Every structure is written in C-alpha cells, then in structure tokens.
Amino acid sequence: QTTRSARSLRPEDDVSNGMGAGERHARRLVRAAGYPKPWTAEKDLALFEAICAGRKLPYAAEAAKVTTEMAKERWNALFPASGRSYEAQVEMIHALRKIVAEAAG
C-alpha cells in the first residue's frame, strides 16, 4: 500500500518505485535546470538524441528547433562536464523519454 507521503513525492525522490540511481540523477538534473522558454521535455530529448547519435551541435540545435548557442547552454545545464560518460548519456535519454511519456499522459 502506498503511503500518502510517497504519493506526493516526485518519481525521482520515491525510492519505492524501482528507479535506478542513474535515472534518478538524470531526472534531478532536469528538475534543477527547469524548463525556461523555449525548452520542453521534447526539445531536450531531441537535443540529446541528436548529440548522442554523433550529430554536431548545429544539427542537434536544428533538431530541437533552437539556436546553436541555446543548445550549447542547455546541454551544459543538463549534462555537467564532471558527469559526462556513455552511461550518463544513456540514463539521460532514458529519463527524458520517460518524462516525455509521462507528460503525454
């Protein structure tokens, strides 16, 4: 049975949901960055999928429908240099896909 306090937690803060540490960390980075205009979960996902697929930043910015400078700033906000690894990229994309799906209902 879910307690009242567990229901009010964000998914990344609820340790009973089976979410891995990497996904929790990725979601916390997204939450900390927020969604200042024009950013949305869909734009974040487009940016990350393009960059992680090996696309150059201008192409990734085009995929997210933002300027190259905006894409660079967002990448750095969501993905600090100190934590960049292949595993962290996979976790971020996984988390963003879930966030987009959750927002869609």
Image (tube, rainbow, N blue to C red):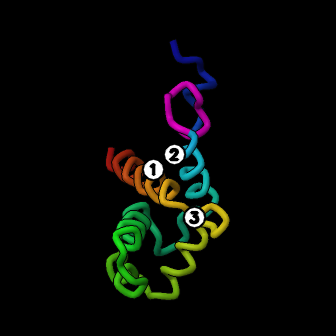
Q: Is residue 74 above or below residue 83?
A: below
- Give the numbered dot on residue 23: 2
Give me the residue at 60% from left, 70% from top: 77
Q: Which residue is mark 3?
A: 84
Give me the residue at 41% from left, 50% from top: 94
Give me the residue at 53% from left, 73% from top: 75
Type of amino acid under label 3: Arg
Give x and y (percent) for residue 78: 57, 65
**Which mark sits nearer the N-terminus, 1 or 3?**
3
Instruction: Quote the CA–CA distance across marks 1 and 2.
Output: 6 Å
Name the residue at the right extreme. 82
Type of amino acid under label 1: Ala
In-front residue for pair 97/88: 88
Helix or strand or loop: what does disc 3 sit on? Answer: loop
Q: Is residue 97 above or below residue 47?
A: above
Look at the image and give the residue range highlighted in magenta: 11-20
Q: Which residue is mark 1?
A: 95
- Give the numbered dot on residue 66: none
